[in-house]
Amino acid sequence: MNEQIFRDKGTLLLAFITGLAINGSFSVLFSTFVPFSIFPMISLGLATWSLHQRYLNRNMPNGVPSLAAAFFLLGILVYSVLVRAEYPNIGSNLIPIVLLIGLIGWIIMRVYRIKR
């Protein structure tokens, strides 16, 4: 079972990239602080399509769907933290960082529990 989860790193990476791209696309379209770019929307489409193809063509071992959801949220939070660090006029960075650290701790505990 451990081998399957660690062979399925691509799904976790695609979930992380999808989280980054969805928050990037939202920021590009609706935030006045972030300059417009088409690349977050292109990466969102490609990462979502690739993730959907992996879902259709492969079986996910137990524990991977919850880890994929956590990596998706991790991508969203990482982009939010980076944008708020670059543009401090948007607001405080405290809540996204606290959520990010808590989510990283949950992911580490979950991977450790799956390894056992």
Image (spheres, helix red, strand yellow):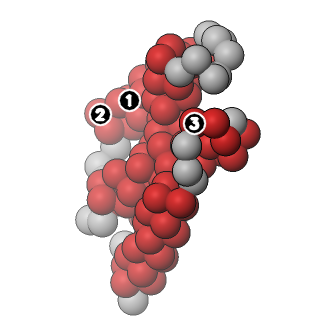
The residue where tag 2 is placed is 56
Task: Kindly identify the residue that appears in the image at 53 percent across and 21 percent down.
Answer: 31
The answer to which image quadrant residue 39 occupies is top right
Task: Kindly identify the residue that appears in the image at 64 percent across and 22 percent down.
Answer: 34
Look at the picture and state if 87 lies above or below 40: below
Task: Kindly identify the residue that appears in the image at 62 percent across and 42 percent down.
Answer: 84
> How far is the residue under mark 1 from the one under mark 2?
5 Å
Kindly identify the amino acid type of the residue bearing the numbered disc 1: Gln
Residue 88 screen position, x and y as percent: 67, 41
Task: Kindly identify the residue that appears in the image at 49 percent across and 32 percent down.
Answer: 23
Q: Confirm or deny contact between disc 1 and disc 2 (CB under 8 A).
A: yes
> How far is the residue under mark 3 from the one under mark 2?
39 Å
Quadrant placement of the N terminus: bottom left
The residue where tag 3 is placed is 90
Is 78 left or right of 4, judged from the image as shown? right
Quadrant placement of the C terminus: bottom left
- Residue 93, disc: none
> How far is the residue under mark 1 from the one under mark 3?
36 Å
Look at the picture and state if 20 lies above or below 28: below
Q: Confirm or deny contact between disc 1 and disc 3 (CB under 8 A).
A: no
Q: Earlier in the sequence, mark 3 or mark 2?
A: 2
- Residue 53, disc: 1
